[in-house]
Amino acid sequence: MQEFINAIIRFPKTIAALLLIVTLGAAYYGQMHFAMNADLSHLVKQEGAWRDNLNALDDAFPQSANVLVVVSGAEQQQTRKVATELANAFEKQALFGSVFAPVTYTWFDKYALGFLSEPEFAALADNAALLVPGLVTASKASSLNRYLGALDSKLSANELDAEQVKTLLTPLVSSLNGQNVTLDKLIQRNPSQPKGYVIALSANEDFSQTTPNKIIIETVRSVIDASDIPQHINVNITGQAALDYDEIQDASQSVAVAGAVSLFSLVCILAVGIRSLRIILASYIAVMVGLIWTFAAGLLLIGSFNTISIVFMVIFIGLGVDFAVHLSLHIYEQRLRGYDNQKSLVQALSHCISPLGLCALSSAIGFLSFYPTAYTGLGELGVISASGMALGLIATFIVIPLFFQLFGYPKVKLQNAKRSKFALALGDMLARYEMRIIVLTVFAALVTGVVATKFRFDFSTLVLKNPDSESVQTLQWLQDNQLGSSYQLYMLAKDEQQAQQWQQQFNQMPEVSTAVTAHNFIPSQYQARVQTLHKLMSMPQSNASSMPLEDFVTKYGSYLKVLGLNAMDEVNHQAVLERLTYSLPLLEQASRVVPPTMSQLPRSIYNRYISKSGEWLVSVSPSGDMRNVVELDAFIEAVQSVVPKATGRAVAEQQVGRIIVKAFYTAIALSIAGISVILLFTVRYKLDILFIFIPLLLTTTTTLSITHWFGQSLNMANIIVVPLIFGLGVDNGIHIVKRYRHEQTMTRFFSSSTPKATLISCFTTIATFGALMLTDHQGMYSIGLLLTIALTAVLCFSLLILPAFLHRFEPSR
């Protein structure tokens, strides 16, 4: 240690130059090799029967759309036109292996009658009975006046109710306003009902690229931007690639925001707590140097960051400053005692190297506790953060002495040498009420321990994402409008009969909104509906006399205006008639079409639901909110009660959740065991090991209890908090125990720099982790929330409970 100090004192500028070169090199390496892992499915090792079922599904039906483009708007005809044009544009892009867009298929136009629901066809039949005879007469006579005469005869009969009058006049109003009268207008659906078309894209991901999802999404957006889309038509993107891309974007932006806020908070807390510009600057530089080193080391060790491991940047700021604060304040304390600069450095470094080294090691163990588990996402975070603890400690022991040697040591202020009245009063109180504190600790542990066992784990990945992102909102819109869901479950039926049997069972379940097989693309009751229309088309023509448009408008103008007739100038009768009879060819065509068979399905649809080996795909969509893990569990349980091998994203997330919970318990056990071993070899009085763990165990039960009381849950991101409680919280225990046993009395302990350093370092850590609560990424937000709760509890319990136990159970001397 003396040689190290001598080198810093003799060659400060040379060491500073080397330090700058190394740091700049690390920064350059990090900038050139920075990458975010876009394949988020690799965050957890996936093995087991459920994975085999998912692989079997992929083998039988390899078309897996990872991008969904949703086109919606109030005007259905124009919305459909936009969706068709977009689908054709996507077909021309080599990036997309397949484009599945039912909106482009003439199949659904040709057999449109068979795809109407029973209420829709009933409305169509009733309305057609009123409208079709007159329309057929006008079409064959090529006379708008003949149609108006027939219409007048029906309206003058005074046998129609208000709804029938509206049915008769609405097509005329639409045609006069320049709109074609489509089947939808004949059915007269509610125009406020959401409508949309889905284009499913299978993008060929290249994970050798740094940001494959970025390339996919930018290509999709470029196609959309190049299209002429009216302002009232909405085009949105969702699907797995879009969800992953948005999450990576949110994670990167969230880390930038949280990092900036935490650095600012760091300066503010140090300014208030230390009031020494030199200490603040030295600590700040030490943190920045360690951060740059760790950033480069993470890329060197792992190769890329994921949406969880990127959090290390904020974690390091909160933890790296602890080393700097403890070392700086100890140097300051030695100078208060009258030592010169060199002696103060030697004394401080000699005293701090053991506890700070133990703190770095225990923190590293807490981070690395997930590494042996199947949760590779947190395992990568552990490797990066553990290396950060070592590099942060090295940076602290180099930067702090070097800074003081180059720019001067912090000035000793006599008023700061006085003992803190508050600290002394706190020490006296703890010594006086030590038994009460111990009893309350045991009682609190029992109460919070019972409540902590009720904690809930939410395995849904949606809870980690920004709910305001386009991909998440579009996904929810799809499910609300029953146009699709990323949480569909799939199963393979051996034949058509089994598929139909399962479909009937699923359609009776309240947890299921729709169950789809290839039969859903075959028009239902088509022959009967064709015969109904055929009778309407062949009804006798009306013998009513002609009526000029001007006379009709004069007679029924008040009704027409109520229905939305625009001001008319010069009317083209032939154009109005063509718009009015626009739907007749489709009706005539439908009345002549022969009902199709399964073999006539378009090949893209057929291959999507019937495999080459004859297996049938059954797709089941949920009716509940898949952001609610209770409803998601109920949906999976209901479907698997019929088909145990049902698979899909919902099952994958559920099974991954179970793997993570198992990893959670393993990580806690490894963290406690590893820290216990370290303490056994470093703590002089073995009973002190138990005292160190008491605040940590109480913090764990308190954190889980508060989480349960406020209706929160553990998820794939914040589950790391509990092992970190032991890895990070033990730092306070080590500092307090070592200093208390060195000072030997409560008064001398609270007069030392350790309580103040502990308080400041905890505040800086809480502030930096609390900055995560300002982010949009819900996974980071939940980490910040739980760590803020946990570290606040650790601070309180370490400074209030631990000294009481140490004072009550003094070792025999």
Image (cartoon, rainbow, N blue to C red):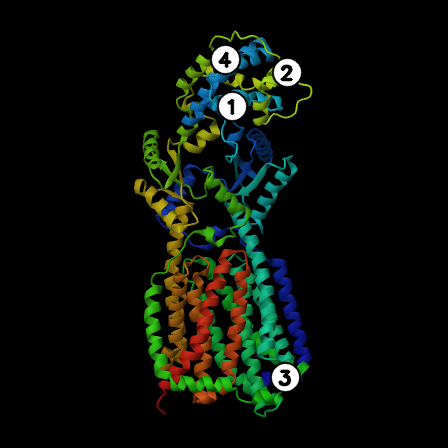
- Mark 1: which amino acid? Lys
Q: Residues within 10 Å of mark 1 (few under 14, many from 20)?
A: some
- Which is nearer the N-term, disc 1 or disc 3? 1
User: What residue does disc 1 label?
Assistant: 166
Residue 133 is tagged as: 4
Kindly indicate the quadrant of the structure image that contains residue 137.
Answer: top right
Gap between marks 2 and 4 measured at Cα: 23 Å
- First along the sequence among labels 1 and 4: 4
Of the 4 image quadrants, the one containing the C terminus is bottom left
Q: CA distance from mark 3 to mark 4?
A: 99 Å
Say left or right for 178 vs 452. right
Q: Amino acid at mark 4?
A: Pro
Residue furthest to the left: 641
Measure how far apart labels 1 and 2 are at the Cα level.
20 Å
Q: Of the two numbered discs 3 and 2 on the same chain, state the one appearing first in sequence.
A: 3
What distance separates the C-alpha of mark 1 from that of mark 4? Answer: 17 Å
Find numbered disc 2 in the image and state the secondary structure of the residue it sits on.
Answer: helix
Q: What is the x, y in percent for residue 628?
A: 41, 50
Q: Could you say whether the residue bearing mark 1 is in a helix, strand or loop?
A: helix
Spatial CA span between label 1 and label 3: 88 Å
Indicate whether 809 appears above or below 489.
below
For marks 1 and 2, the one nearer the N-term is 1
Could you tell me how far apart the alpha carbons at marks 3 and 2 are, in whole angstroms? 97 Å
Q: Considering only vertical position in the picture, is 240 above or below 417?
A: above
Q: Residues within 10 Å of mark 2 (few under 14, many from 20)?
A: few
The circle drawn on residue 550 is 2
